[in-house]
Image: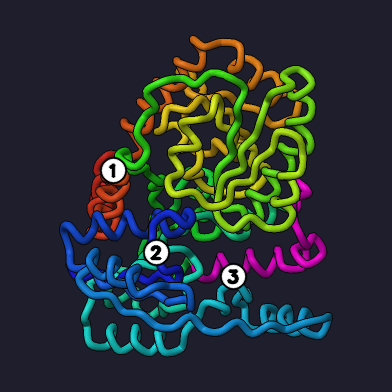
């Protein structure tokens, strides 16, 4: 098949965040079996060497410049953005990554019948697909997480950066997500929770759950348990959900833990730490590393990895990578979303500060439990969360085999 993948996020190198990692690994798998054209946008900091490396992974690479940011300042700007969203129905976050020249290229390609399938890698790319195309080719949107569900969760948990704005936007996001989800032939999500949300928007939709994966060579299981009282939290440190998690754990959990274990430390590891994360490095025992060459190295040095997410939907790459690396994991319900970790025990759950202190203390003091979680976590990833498995499932959705298999399992005609 001839496949057009649309990703306004430049998916290389595949170490910048969840969107890049998922997009790159899925296109890498599909290219082994199909002709893949990738349409993407280039930022000013995208290097020629990165473009050359990405070009090696696809049949055709089509690049347009990312539109320059147009900042509307003050209350007038905020009112204008809200008015545009209210009347036009498309969130500002989607419009900022929209390229009219890229749109023209896609429309000409569809008119020329160049492709059998179009995939939108992340819901922000839905803007490039017309509802009428569903009758002439297969159109797929790969939703990494529900924007409505995420906004609603942030308001409910008190983690929204702009609660007033988000309360106004919430019904508009509901309308937006409900509308765009109906124009696709197939919908792909990463967790059962997101499938339930999208099914509410579009009851008759064909929705496949395809979780993220891990590159097992990039994240080998660790050879030795370092012991000690060293914690690590990994993730892009300019992401709202990660910022909240880093600050929550640093300010509300670590000080309590350090009363019991005075030498307990926390490494905050990830790209682009914002000021509110950098300032955490001034607190006792906390190191903000910024970007590191290989994420697996700080994981292997840690006694325990924490994923203290209070918001953010979808399966978390950081949890998968820690388990692949064989690091005992303590995470919240949000951090462990979509993962079967309770029976058999593969990670410890915690949501409140006292639960984190209790779970981490157990692991600090019980080497056998650390070894159990290390082995069972790695085994789970090898069994269910490789990019090979995710790519195979994605290929089945693209070809229509996923739906046929599902109907056969339920005793229906495909």
Q: Quadrant of residue 174?
A: bottom right
Q: Tell us which disc is closer to us: 3 or 1.
A: 1
What's the magenta region?
155-180
Q: Earlier in the sequence, mark 1 or mark 2?
A: 2
Which of label 1 and label 2 is nearer to you?
2
| Residue visible at 55% across and 49% down in the picture | 270
Q: Dot 1, crowdedness within 10 Å: few (<14), some or many (≥20)?
A: some
In this rendering, which labeled residue sits more in front, label 2 or label 3?
Answer: 2
User: In the image, is 98 to the left or to the right of 240?
Assistant: left
Residue wearing tag 3: 176
Label 3, residues with CA under 10 Å away: few <14, some 14-19, many ≥20: many
Q: CA distance from mark 1 to mark 2?
A: 20 Å
| Residue drawn 37% across the image and 61% down it | 186
Residue 239 in picture, x, y percent from top left: 62, 56
Residue 167 highlighted magenta (yes or no): yes
Q: Contact, CB < 8 Å: mark 2 with mark 3?
A: no
Q: Element under label 3? A: helix
**Which quadrant holds residue 72?**
bottom right
Residue linked to disc 1 = 389
Vertical order, 198 against 184 (above or below)? above
The residue closer to the viewer here, 38 or 165, is 38
- Who comes first in sequence, dot 3 or dot 1? 3
| Mark carried by residue 11 | 2
Q: Nearer the viewer, residue 199 or 80?
A: 80
Specify the color scheme: rainbow
Name the quadrant of the N terminus. Answer: bottom left
């Amino acid at each position: 098949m001839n496949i057009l993948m649309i990703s306004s996020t430049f998916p290389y190198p595949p170490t910048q965040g969840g969107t890049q990692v998922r997009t790159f690994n899925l296109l890498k798998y599909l290219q082994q079996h199909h002709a893949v054209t990738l349409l993407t946008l280039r930022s000013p900091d995208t290097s020629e060497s990165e473009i050359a490396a990405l070009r090696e992974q696809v049949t055709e690479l089509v690049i347009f410049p990312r539109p320059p940011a147009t900042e509307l300042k003050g209350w007038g700007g905020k009112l204008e953005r809200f008015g545009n969203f209210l009347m036009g129905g498309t969130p500002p976050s989607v419009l900022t990554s929209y390229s009219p020249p890229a749109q023209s290229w896609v429309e000409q390609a569809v008119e020329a019948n160049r492709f059998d399938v179009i995939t939108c890698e992340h819901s922000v790319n839905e803007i490039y697909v017309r509802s009428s195309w569903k009758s002439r080719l297969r159109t797929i949107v790969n939703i990494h997480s529900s924007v409505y569900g995420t906004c609603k969760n942030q308001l409910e948990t008190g983690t929204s950066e702009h609660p007033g704005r988000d309360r106004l936007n919430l019904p508009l996001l509901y309308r937006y997500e409900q509308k765009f989800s109906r124009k696709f032939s197939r919908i792909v999500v990463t967790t059962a929770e997101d499938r339930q949300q999208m099914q509410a928007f579009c009851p008759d939709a064909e929705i496949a759950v395809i979780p993220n994966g891990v590159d097992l060579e990039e994240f080998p299981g660790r050879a030795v348990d370092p012991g000690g009282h060293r914690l690590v939290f990994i993730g892009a440190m300019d992401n709202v959900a990660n910022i909240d998690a880093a600050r929550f754990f640093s300010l509300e959990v670590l000080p309590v833990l350090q009363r019991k274990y005075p030498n307990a430390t926390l490494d905050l590891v990830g790209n682009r730490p914002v000021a509110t994360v950098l300032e955490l490095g001034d607190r006792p025992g906390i190191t903000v590393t910024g970007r590191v060459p290989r994420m697996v190295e700080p994981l292997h040095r840690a006694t325990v990895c924490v994923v203290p997410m209070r918001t953010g939907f979808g399966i978390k790459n950081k949890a998968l990578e820690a388990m692949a690396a064989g690091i005992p994991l303590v995470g919240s319900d949000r951090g462990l979303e979509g993962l079967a970790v309770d029976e058999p025990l593969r990670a410890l759950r915690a949501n409140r500060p006292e639960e984190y202190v209790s779970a981490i203390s157990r692991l600090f003091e019980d080497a056998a439990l650390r070894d159990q979680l290390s082995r069972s976590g790695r085994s789970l990833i090898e069994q269910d969360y490789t990019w090979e498995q995710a790519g195979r499932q994605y290929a089945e959705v693209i070809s229509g085999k996923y739906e046929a298999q599902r109907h056969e399992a339920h005793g229906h005609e495909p």
